[in-house]
Image: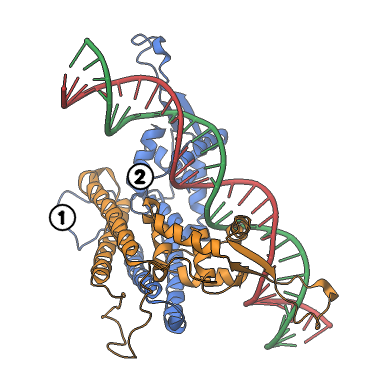
Chain colours: A blue, B orange, C red, D green
Amino acid sequence: MLEFAILGLLQEAPMHGYELRKELTAKLGAIRAAISYGSLYPTLRRLQAAGWITEAAEAPATAEEVPALTSRRGRVVYTITAEGKERFAQLIAQAGPETYDDTGFGVHFAFFARTDQATRLRILEGRRRKIEERREGLRDVLGRAAERLDAYTLELQRHGLDACEREVRWLEELIANERSGRAPADPRRGTAGGRGDNDSPPTPGTSRTERP
Amino acid sequence: MLEFAILGLLQEAPMHGYELRKELTAKLGAIRAAISYGSLYPTLRRLQAAGWITEAAEAPATAEEVPALTSRRGRVVYTITAEGKERFAQLIAQAGPETYDDTGFGVHFAFFARTDQATRLRILEGRRRKIEERREGLRDVLGRAAERLDAYTLELQRHGLDACEREVRWLEELIANERSGRAPADPRRGTAGGRGDNDSPPTPGTSRTERP
DNA sequence: GTGCGATGTATCGGTCCGATACATCGCGGT
DNA sequence: ACCGCGATGTATCGGACCGATACATCGCAC
């Protein structure tokens, strides 16, 4: 998952670790707290070893100002390679069942702007099915096994069931939107009608590996 | 987290691994998919090494039927020890900040019936604060950084924000209920008024380490 | 009689987290 | 003038947990 997210983010701009973490946190804030350096740096190492990103020490200010004095440990800037872009495309194309769990789905969704419509649809439907299964499981427990469980556990299940139902509805909306061929413009909330064309017509895909 | 959940469950009855997993899945179904044997068995080993549970091969049917023939690898039944119960109580009492993340909170909540009211309140309020912080973070992103992000990422944030607001409301309700001193009886859903006193007056705590 | 899904125990490699360490920079306070 | 302190920045280590896999038994349907 981290690998996927990093490759996705680095396609927007080269970054160093700290920045990467901040962007990741902003982009994925809805689904996970904040990724740890204990995962980030080893993963960067791994990606570099695989040739999907390159690592370059930041230029020390035109090599003139601030000489070797104190030997400033410069920031390390990571850049995605052509192979990295291919890898990212491949990860999207695979998009198997592991993509449908909470984190996996969230991360993939966050990069839907770089995903072709067919795959978007496939992922949304896979996720929906998974949530529907979870929902049925919760209904079973609340129905059949209710008297075996204490009031708090039951309340937890109810809350979970609620969340499932809500997410299914959300996914239905997104799927319908996707089928109608347009971006997830949400009519409920503000900016009704205004401001130019639209924000980010989400790059309707099939683009693999464009020029550097 | 697993350690906590296992100690909690084994206080209801001794169990073998497979059963433990099933019960765990039923009890925690709302918050996590299904715990893996790759975590379960090593954890059981660890708990046994610490002396918090004991491991006993199931009696092979009064030692008479089914002799050593085929050397049936019997099920291994785990039983919690007095030290294990103490450990569980201690884990509840600690209930630090790590208790407020998604999984940690969920697992603790599932065992609220074995938690004293003061700690319940503390956990609920800690969780609320944490969710409020996440909510503020999402609002910030949706407000200030909106134009930097694509439509899909924004939609994800909106959905996350929605979930945060909903959970805060849920927690408020639970906290109010808790302050008023009663179980999380939910008036919205079925069984309004009926059926004896109430289900499971949730063991109002301060009980540490009762007799074996 | 045989295959197949549920029950049941167990390991291995790999991902990710939390704690920790350490260094630099710019800012406000005293 | 100095100091601390929070933000920036890179990095490691032990441990928790997962997913895949392996293997064995049981009962039942075909």
Query: Which residue is denoted by mark 1 in the rendering?
Result: A191
Q: Is residue A122 above or below residue A146?
A: above
Given the image, on which type of amino acid does mark 1 rest?
Answer: Thr
**Which quarter of the figure is the C terminus of chain A placed in?**
top left
On screen, residue A13 versus residue B68, left or right, reads left
Q: Is residue A53 above or below residue B77?
A: above
User: Which of pointers 1 and 2 indicates the residue nearer the eye?
Assistant: 2
Residue occupying image coordinates x 39% and y 37%: A20
The numbered dot on residue A19 is: none
Give the chain letter at badge 1. A
Residue occupying image coordinates x 23% and y 44%: B147
Q: Position of residue D27 (x, y in %)?
A: 71, 85
Residue that protrudes farthest toward the bottom in the picture: B195
Q: Position of residue B32 (x, y in %)?
A: 46, 63
Q: Is residue B193 above or below residue A175?
A: below
Tell me if mark 1 has few (under 14), some (14-19) or many (20+) residues whose alpha carbon lies within 10 angstroms of its own.
Answer: few
Q: Position of residue D14 (x, y in %)?
A: 57, 41
Mark 1 to mark 2: distance in Å? 26 Å
Element marked by disc 2: helix
Query: Which residue is denoted by mark 2 in the rendering?
Result: A25
Does residue A183 appear in this view?
no
Residue occupying image coordinates x 26% and y 73%: B181
A174 or C3, nearer to the observer: C3
Q: Position of residue B182 (x, y in %)?
A: 28, 75
Does label 1 or label 2 sit earlier along the sequence? 2
Find residue A17 and report its image quarter: top left
On screen, residue B195 versus residue B208, left or right, reads left
Find residue B45 and report its image quarter: bottom right
Element marked by disc 1: loop
Q: Is residue A178 above or below residue C6?
A: above
Does residue A20 appear in this view?
yes
How many numbered marks appear? 2
